[in-house]
Image (spheres, coloured by chain):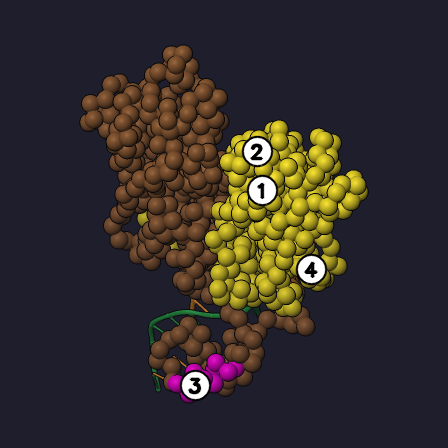
Chain colours: A yellow, B brown, C green, D orange
Amino acid sequence: MDRRPVTLEEVARVAGVSRATVSRVVNGVATVDRELRQVVEKAISTTGYAPNRAARSLVTRRAGAIGLVLPDEGRTLHDPYFGRVVSGVLPVIRPLGVQLVLTTTDPGGHQEVVDDVRQRRLDGVILIHTHDADPLPRLLTESNLPVVLAARPVRPMSITYVDVDQAAGAGLAVDHLVARGCRRVATVTGPLEAPAGQDRLRGFREAVARHGLPEPLVVEGDFSREGGAAAARRLVAGRGPLGEGFDGLFVASDLMATGALPVLRHRGLRVPEDVKVVGFDDSSPAVECDPPLTTVRQPVEDMAAEMARLLVERVERPDRPISSVVFAPTLVVRQSG
Amino acid sequence: MDRRPVTLEEVARVAGVSRATVSRVVNGVATVDRELRQVVEKAISTTGYAPNRAARSLVTRRAGAIGLVLPDEGRTLHDPYFGRVVSGVLPVIRPLGVQLVLTTTDPGGHQEVVDDVRQRRLDGVILIHTHDADPLPRLLTESNLPVVLAARPVRPMSITYVDVDQAAGAGLAVDHLVARGCRRVATVTGPLEAPAGQDRLRGFREAVARHGLPEPLVVEGDFSREGGAAAARRLVAGRGPLGEGFDGLFVASDLMATGALPVLRHRGLRVPEDVKVVGFDDSSPAVECDPPLTTVRQPVEDMAAEMARLLVERVERPDRPISSVVFAPTLVVRQSG
DNA sequence: CTGAAAGCGCTTACAG
DNA sequence: CTGAAAGCGCTTACAG
């Protein structure tokens, strides 16, 4: 029952050929004689042979696995964004026989990630949501290890990344609010130390100026639901008793918008009649909340697939020049604005 | 810059000892002489040595990785449940140096999972949400490969699983509705081919009988938001013009409840004034929806941690008898009921 | 097209 | 407590 696993050696003996030939058949080398190949294939199936990946990795110097690194469990793991990334990555790496290893970088986790790559347990990593203080992008690039960032790096550095045009997305939101008749717009921003927070605010401001709108209300959020609610409270507190102050609101993430909507409602403001609201991401909270959110869509699955492709490419050809990819956002119109 | 990685051999040469001794230091074998250990440690740090895991795996016959297998991407990956499982598993395996590999079983994926274990890329797997037709539990147990199910198996079999007492949870929901004064209760069930769907319905029925309530309304759902909405529509269609018919509703998952709530609202039924609603899971939709959901909590993170422990235990000692763990659910009271 | 042989980088009895 | 040596199971030049 629980015998030793079958090795290449045994298959070779059964087939009456050398280990090299079996290896060639297993790896689909084209030059093997047809008859011989069939003999070997039969031997493989009768013995129930399964190649030992560790042995292969040892000689090929490939782990056959890439890492998906998320910051400090708490936040990202429960973010709907996460599942979308995984479902974008898997279809590109699986046909290549590459595994996806999940990690988070809680305290001490940074070094662990670097070690995993140095120990060749991981051929490279995809890094999600790097905050300002995250040392990982630099740690990895300095060791010349393959890495792809899921967003523009906080400080300019020579690193591959995939991003959506954040500023253009915010512009789309403002254009839509204006087209729907809004004249006084406000925004709940993301955390301003994050590139996404900065870029979306910049795009918002540029679009406001382009449309010749009056100075907008700006309140900083943090991409969390609670942060969205808190920001919305500050926003409505600044309004007059009838709610005058703004008739269009751009919330820089859907999750924050789900926190902001109930605040507006409790203040007696109807969405979209009194205030039109546009979110960002087009994540699942956008369709779950009430009313469903008009929002700027990031093609997260496509972006994730691209990250995987870039990473694999980098692993194969480490000497190729570094390149990044920026996707265009689109607007998804629902009931909120 | 891009030199060959340092090997044990080189560390040994630098430290002036044998490879065996370096190996012992790296692996923390206690019997190494203190002075020697320090010499080796210095050599390790000056050379920047990182052990090659493939080489180690080859001799230890351990991949140092376990798989988390999710069914057909579409559904589970975007389920909030998924992130909770990951955050439960990671803290137990990381200190052990074990990696978490993510996989889904789309068409053909079953064999891939089995192969990954047979090829020793994975020491064992945690299987989520197995449906009736899922061949994986049997495939794996028949090959005597380590596996832990995230729920009771559909058909009785000798396999390790971790579950919550589903029926008891449904009972908690009914007890609560009754305590709040409900007299006519209804339920939206899960898919009845899934054990969780069956068990929650059974628990619901038993509790209804125990309280001496009249025959309840029962409509089958499928654990999706849309399925919850559709089931709720069928439920309200059966009510009289004033909404008489039921004053308490147990929805067998929070996600379905988020689909059901708007249907009730559009029908003019206030929650909780006209109908009290209790969900199941205590997942993020429960706090995001309006009103926030009273729900039966599954301690998913704890359950996931337990799965990881059981799996690791099984990998270490394959001959130990199989055991399973069932957790007790609790009720979380919010605004919906 | 095929095989003999070296080698990938570790761990682990086995002596001493 | 330490070292010499075998061995884990593959792949891949190198001959032929």
Q: Nearer the viewer, mark 4 or mark 2?
A: 2
- CB-based contact (under 8 Å), mark 1 and mark 2: yes
The kind of residue tagged 4 is: Ile
Q: Which mark is residue A269?
A: 2
Q: Magenta part of the protein: which range?
A: B34-43
Chain letter for the residue marked with disc 2 in the picture = A
**Viewer-proximal residue among A234 and B220:** A234
At 34% across and 54% down in the image, what residue appears? B309
- CB-based contact (under 8 Å), mark 4 and mark 1: no
Q: Residues within 10 Å of mark 1 (few under 14, many from 20)?
A: some
Q: Nearer the viewer, mark 3 or mark 4?
A: 4
**Viewer-proximal residue among A269 and A107:** A269
The kind of residue tagged 3 is: Leu
Which SS class for mark 1? Answer: helix
Q: How far is disc 4 from disc 1 in space, using C-alphas?
A: 41 Å
Q: Which x, y percent locates residue A43? A: 48, 46
Q: How far is disc 1 from disc 3 in space, using C-alphas?
A: 69 Å
Q: Which x, y percent locates residue B11? A: 52, 79
Q: Which mark is residue A159?
A: 4
Which SS class for mark 4? Answer: loop
Placement of A176 over or under B32, stated as above or below: above
At 23% across and 28% down in the image, what residue appears? B207
Q: How far is disc 1 from disc 2 in space, using C-alphas?
A: 9 Å
Q: Which residue is mark 3?
A: B36
